[in-house]
Image: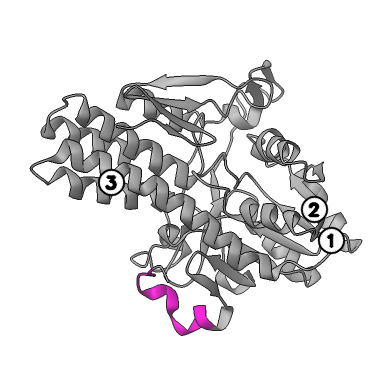
Amino acid sequence: MQNLDTTSLRVRDSRLWILDQQALPQRQDWCATDTVAELVDHIHALRVRGAPLIGLSASLLLALLAENGMERRALLQSLALLRAARPTAVNLMNNLARMAQALDRDDYPAAMAVEALRLVEEDRALCGAIAGHGVALVGAGSRLLTHCNTGGLATAGIGTALGVIRVAAAQGKVRRVWVDETRPLLQGGRLTAWELGELAIPYTLICDAMAAGLMARGEVDAVWVGADRIAANGDVANKIGTYSLAVLAHFHGIPFYVAAPHTSHDPACPDGAAIPIEQREAGEVTGVAGSFGSCQWAPENADVDNPAFDVTPAALISAWVLDTGIVTPAQAQSGIFRKPLTQG
């Protein structure tokens, strides 16, 4: 396979390298990833994260394993292990379905390499199209609030929600970005703040609990978030804390926008209640760990509930901004999400 560079993924001399997102922003460490077990561990540890990026990393590793001589039976087993690594994000399932089709071909090593690289290029194009549609919804001098991380660290391109913000900032429309720290793993504080700093986009980091006060004072013009899965009725699963922001935005009359590629849409999933929600380790809530070390602040035996995602009902969403275009609430109610979306 040819060499490849994205913000968080590299292919060099038939090896996959992953930027360790748990080490950011203090360090930029690249992890060589040669086995499915290593990649699954990276996914579970959130060294690689973001629904699009997880799907791309899995596709690239499978293609490299095929090129390096892994037989079809072992590749099928590897594909099944990767599919189970992150149950909420549908991009992983969609990418692996396409890799499985390539694996069915007689020339599967070459076919899988072509398909993996095609998925990367498609993701870059999807990000650009999302930003192109979404920037029209950003007014001049906007103060935008975002949650988790939806930029180039989470995709092969410029990102989804953060990609919209990036293009809007380049057009001079963005006065300030409010960045939720995004408890418990601080993807906003560690990753989004780092990305915005690298892009020289003005931002202010806030604790998740501060969003309500900002909205009450009239300091937020819109909320922009991503999506790990969009159900057939328009309900959206995204990083835990997204639902809270949607409720707050609705109460304060603030637009709440979801930016995602059409590959995050799952017409086979009837509504948010049917989306599997990953439950993560208690240690993420009882303390904190990173490149700086670790700290435990809760009792060792504390009972913990730690869902990685929550579901925002379609009724709270002002618009879904996709690569295929902007979907309005009226279109969602008419059933546009009940069938597969196709690129325009």
Q: Which residue is drawn at 65% across and 28% down?
A: 286
| Residue type marked 2 | Ala
* Residue bearing the label numbered 1: 215
Find residue 87 and report its horizontal and vertical position in percent: 39, 46
**Which of disc 3 and disc 1 is earlier in sequence?**
3
Pick the front one: 320 or 169: 169
204 sits left or right of 120 in the view: right
Mark 1–mark 3 contact, CB under 8 Å? no
82 sits left or right of 265 in the view: left
In the image, residue 341 lies in the stretch drawn in magenta = yes
Q: Residue 115 carries which label?
A: 3
Q: How far apart are marks 1 and 3 (CA)?
A: 44 Å
Direction left: furthest residue: 106
Q: What stretch is highlighted in magenta?
A: 331-342
Find residue 230 and report its horizontal and vertical position in percent: 47, 62
Pick the front one: 254 or 59: 59
| Residue type marked 3 | Glu
Of badges 2 and 3, the one in the foreground is 3
Q: How far apart are marks 2 and 3 (CA)?
A: 42 Å
Q: In which quarter of the image is the N terminus?
A: top left
* Residue bearing the label numbered 2: 211
Mark 1–mark 2 contact, CB under 8 Å? yes
Q: Distance between the residues labelled 1 and 2?
A: 6 Å
Find residue 146 and report its horizontal and vertical position in percent: 70, 52
Disc 2 is placed on an element classified as: helix
Q: How crowded is mark 2: few (under 14 residues within 10 Å), some or many (20 or more)?
A: many
